[in-house]
């Protein structure tokens, strides 16, 4: 019983921060879809769409909930200090 409690607590601690890790990105995707298509996106679609919206070329368009938005990934060619 003690092992079960320890296992449950350990998995809760390990899995707890995962949804918050993309909290700002979820809001960015939500805002982008709202601004572009005036649509609300269900949270389950938003969570799946974060990777899609950020794992793309910076000038590419991605479709989220039948709304085309620009890729939210920043330009990878920027060099700081030059």
Image (cartoon, rainbow, N blue to C red):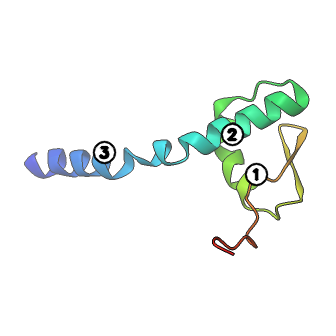
Q: Please name whichever residue, 41 or 28, is drawn nearer the observer in this view of the structure.
A: 28
The quadrant of the picture occupied by the N terminus is: top left
Task: Determine the CA span between mark 2 and mark 3.
Answer: 27 Å
Mark 3 or mark 1: whose residue is earlier in sequence: 3
**Residue 12 at x, y percent in the picture:** 31, 45
Query: Residues at badges 2 and 1 in contact (C-beta under 8 Å)?
Result: yes
The quadrant of the picture occupied by the C terminus is: bottom right
Mark 2 or mark 3: whose residue is earlier in sequence: 3
Question: Is residue 42 found left or right of 7 in the rendered image?
Answer: right
Residue 12, labelled with which disc? 3
Question: Quadrant of the rendered structure where residue 76 is?
Answer: bottom right
Query: Which residue carries the number 2 mark?
Result: 28
Q: Residue at x 83, y 29 (%)?
A: 35
**Residue 23 at x, y percent in the picture:** 54, 40
**Residue 34 at x, y percent in the picture:** 80, 28
Query: Which residue carries the number 1 mark?
Result: 72
Disc 3 residue crowd, few under 14, some 14–19, many 20+, Cα 10 Å: few
- Badge 3 marks a residue whose secondary structure is helix
- Badge 2 marks a residue whose secondary structure is helix
**Residue 24 at x, y percent in the picture:** 58, 41
């Amino acid at each position: 019983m003690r092992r079960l409690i320890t296992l449950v607590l350990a998995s809760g601690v390990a899995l707890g921060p995962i949804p918050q890790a993309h909290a700002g990105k979820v809001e960015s995707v939500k805002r982008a879809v709202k601004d572009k298509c005036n649509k609300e996106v269900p949270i389950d679609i938003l969570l799946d769409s974060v990777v899609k919206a950020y794992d793309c070329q910076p000038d590419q368009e991605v479709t989220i909930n039948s709304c085309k938005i620009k890729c939210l990934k920043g330009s990878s060619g920027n060099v700081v200090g030059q």
